[in-house]
Image: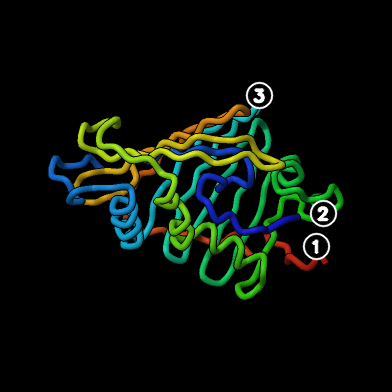
Amino acid sequence: MSFSPRRRLHVISFALGIALVLAVTPVVAQASVKNPTAKSVLKAAQKAMSQESGVHIFVTSTQGTSKSVVVVDIGATYGEETITSGKNTVRIIVTPTDAYLSGSPTGLTLIMRLTAAEQKKVGTHSVLMKAGTSPYTSFHSNLTTSVLTGILPPAKGTKFKVGGGEHSKDYQLTWKTSASSTTSATTSVLTVSSGSKTLPLNEVITGTSGGGTTKFSKWGEQVVEHAPASANTIPYAKVFG
């Protein structure tokens, strides 16, 4: 099973090919960036996101014939992610001291890449990962607000214009990502609010193999997750050795 960190938010569902559409509170007419450029808007957006304590994310995506839904609550020290792809489901919870992984049999094997033997050991329990371990660190870094530092593209190679979004004065950023050995080339269009908070509003990622949308709401929410009962957990070492 791989716990590789997901440094870009559009791969928040473990390579399910998710695209982003972010929705925040309505913007006001006053522009938040004077003489905006790709560089200045990205800098302002990065600063705005760094001041947010949490966010709710709802993702829908299509890759080939596969459709997926990912729901995430990202907080400063707590986080939760639920992945649904057909009948396959996975749930991940992060607290300041532990992380928990559970899911349907096929969700654990097809999405999380557990072996059949590992999945059998988990059963209906949640795999318990303690703070300080590599598995915990990976989940914590991807389900808490530190992951937001990787959502924005570099200014170099990003095209910029005003307008094109829901509001005529919003900022629109467009860039391309080259194909790799496992993914097709994609085009991303990110709309950023020109209002009092320069937060991303929506991003659409399209590629030859699929695309999708993500809606962000509740910027600034306080996320607190409750751990499963200890009787319903199984230590990581008992599953993976």
User: Which residue type carries mark 3?
Assistant: Thr
Q: Tell which circle, 3 or 2, labels the residue nearer the N-terminal end.
A: 3
Image quarter for residue 162?
A: top left
Q: Which corner quadrant of the image does residue 75 belong to? A: bottom left
Q: CA distance from mark 3 to mark 1?
A: 32 Å
Q: Nearer the viewer, mark 3 or mark 1?
A: 3
* C-alpha span from label 3 to label 2: 28 Å
Q: Is residue 62 above or below residue 198?
A: above
Q: Nearer the viewer, residue 34 or 16?
A: 34
**Looking at the image, is mark 3 or mark 1 earlier in the sequence?**
3
Q: Secondary structure at mark 2?
A: helix
Q: Is residue 156 left or right of residue 7?
A: left
Structural crowding at the residue carrying mark 1, measured as other residues with C-alpha within 10 Å and reported as few (<14), some (14–19) or many (≥20): some
Q: Earlier in the sequence, mark 2 or mark 1?
A: 2
Residue 193: quadrant of the picture: top left
> Is there any visible trace of residue 188 in the rendered image?
yes
- The N terminus is located in which quarter? bottom right
Query: Disc 1 designates what residue?
Result: 240
In-image side of 205 versus 39 (left or right): right
* Image coordinates for residue 231, horizontal then vertical, percent: 68, 63
> Looking at the picture, how far across and down is residue 72, in whole percent?
49, 48
In the displayed structure, 121 sits above or below 209; it is below
- Residue at disc 3, secondary structure: loop
Whether label 2 touches label 1, CB < 8 Å: yes
Q: Residues within 10 Å of mark 3 (few under 14, many from 20)?
A: few
Q: Quadrant of the C terminus?
A: bottom right
Residue 167 horizontal/vertical position (percent): 23, 33
How was this image coloured?
rainbow
The answer to whether mark 3 and mark 2 are in CB contact below 8 A is no
Q: Which residue is mark 2?
A: 118
Image location of residue 154, percent across then percent down: 44, 52
What mark, if any, has residue 65 been given in the picture? 3
